[in-house]
Amino acid sequence: MKLFTVIGARPQFIKDSAVSWAIRAENARGVGLHEVIKHTRQHFDVNISKLFFEKLYIPEPDYILGVASMGHGSMTGQRLV
């Protein structure tokens, strides 16, 4: 089963760290879950995002939107795609 996770700002990183941990725990029991991560890159500082992934043990994202440099309307539209 695939679980699709969208993260971008600090609250989503914190929440997803628990989800990612639970997925790894279930997979250790042979459940067969796969988390697909889409990163909106809302943080303007790429190093902060990288730090969240490393310190919270979240797998690298499968997709990166890079919406941080867009206006609010474009950013919202891009997230909906």
Image (tube, rainbow, N blue to C red):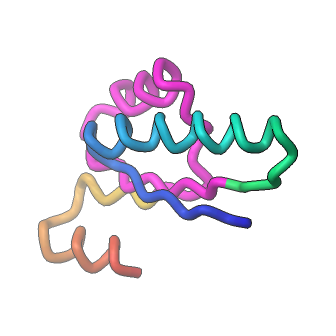
Task: Compare residues 22 and 50 and report the one nearer the observer.
Answer: 22
Left or right of 36 on screen, residue 70: left
Number of labels in the image equals 0
Q: Position of residue 33 (x, y in %)?
A: 73, 55
The part of the chain drawn in magenta is 35-64
| Residue found at x 33% / y 74% | 78
Image quarter of residue 11: top left
Q: Position of residue 52 (x, y in %)?
A: 41, 27
| Residue found at x 37% / y 56% | 40
Which residue reaches farthest right?
Answer: 30
| Residue found at x 26% / y 53% | 68
Left or right of 66 on screen, residue 62: right
| Residue found at x 78% / y 43% | 27
- Whether 43 is among the magenta residues is yes
Asked if residue 36 is positioned above or below residue 1 in the image, the reply reads above
**Quadrant of the snapshot with the C terminus:** bottom left
Task: Compare residues 65 and 7 and report the one nearer the observer.
Answer: 7
Task: Compare residues 7 and 41 and report the one nearer the observer.
Answer: 7
**Quadrant of the snapshot with the N terminus:** bottom right
- Whether 74 is among the magenta residues is no
Task: Compare residues 53 and 22 and report the one nearer the observer.
Answer: 22
